[in-house]
Amino acid sequence: MTFSITTWNINSVRLRMPIVEQFLVRYQPDVLCLQETKCPNGEFPLKPLKALGYEHVMIHGQKGYHGVAIASKLPLSEDHRQDYCGVGDARHVSAIVEAGSRRIRVHNFYVPAGGDEPDRSINPKFGHKLDFIEEMKVLKSNSGPGLSSILVGDLNIAPLENDVWSHKQLLKIVSHTPVETEGLLDVMKKGDWLDLMRLNVPDSEKIYTWWSYRAKEWDVANRGRRLDHIWSSPDLGPSLNKIEILREARGWNRPSDHVPVTAHFKF
């Protein structure tokens, strides 16, 4: 069978529901993971999702800030919401999805952006981000017997040199500083996670999923970063068919600054 999962920082799900619907009608992933939904659970737009066949939805919302959700055509079970750093932010939700004979624990993350100054002594937001990444290091891809794992989300870090438009110019910019990139790579290593976006794309090739709102001609300038990620437990690697980054979505009407990234599997 085939199985597909999309991650997308939507930057306000109610504001951008028209392009969410546009994407789902055209591409129809089995599971859609959204970040930065920016609305409490009771105001989440369930009706249009269910009308398109996404009847199973797990939400961890928050008024005006953060927020993550998993919407699925397939049943979801055993949902969990982790309060990383113990500050009450809605930045994680997970659930088990059954795809044929496969049982997969899906983790959906929205890692703190970290502010503008990469110094925790003067910027608490950066310290929060580093603490969040430190707590993620205990998360293992091995969820238990007969259970695979997929981790997706806006991790707000571009870990490799070619995950940014200029490695040298961004070394002191939040999202690509050494302390962040080394921390995220350590999360991957300690948890035995497989970076699916780099599985069939060499490290020497550029990959971007985000283009700043500040760039008037974002497409021409192409100063992107790979802030959105799809990881898995090693057992799913051989089943990966392809990764799609929908660059064109950055140019849709009232877009997010992130674009959808979809992993396709054949089991």
Image: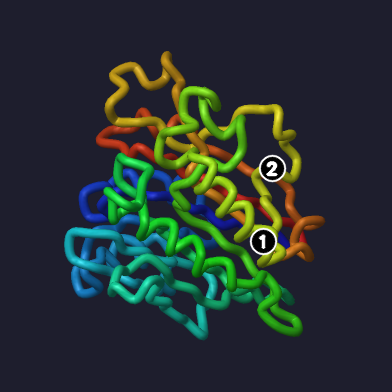
Is 172 rendered above or below residue 76? above
Q: In the image, residue 185 lies at what x, y percent? A: 62, 52
Label 1: which residue? 232
At label 2, counting other C-alpha atoms closer than 10 Å, the crowd grade (few under 14, some 14-19, many 20 or more) is some
Q: Going by the image, does 208 lie left or right of 61? A: right
Q: Residue at x 60, y 56 (%)?
A: 4
* Residue 198 numbered mark, or none: 2
Residue at far front of view: 121
Which residue lies at the image location 68% right of the left edge and 65% below the top edge? 190
In which quadrant is the N terminus drawn?
Answer: bottom right
Look at the numbered discs 2 and 1 and tell me whether their residues touch, using CB distance below 8 Å: no
Q: Amino acid at mark 2?
A: Arg
Which of 59 and 47 lies nearest the eye of the viewer? 59
**Residue shown at 51%/76% (left/top)?**
95
CA gap between label 2 and label 1 equals: 12 Å
235 vs 225, nearest the viewer: 225
Q: Earlier in the sequence, mark 2 or mark 1?
A: 2
Displayed quadrant of residue 60 = bottom left
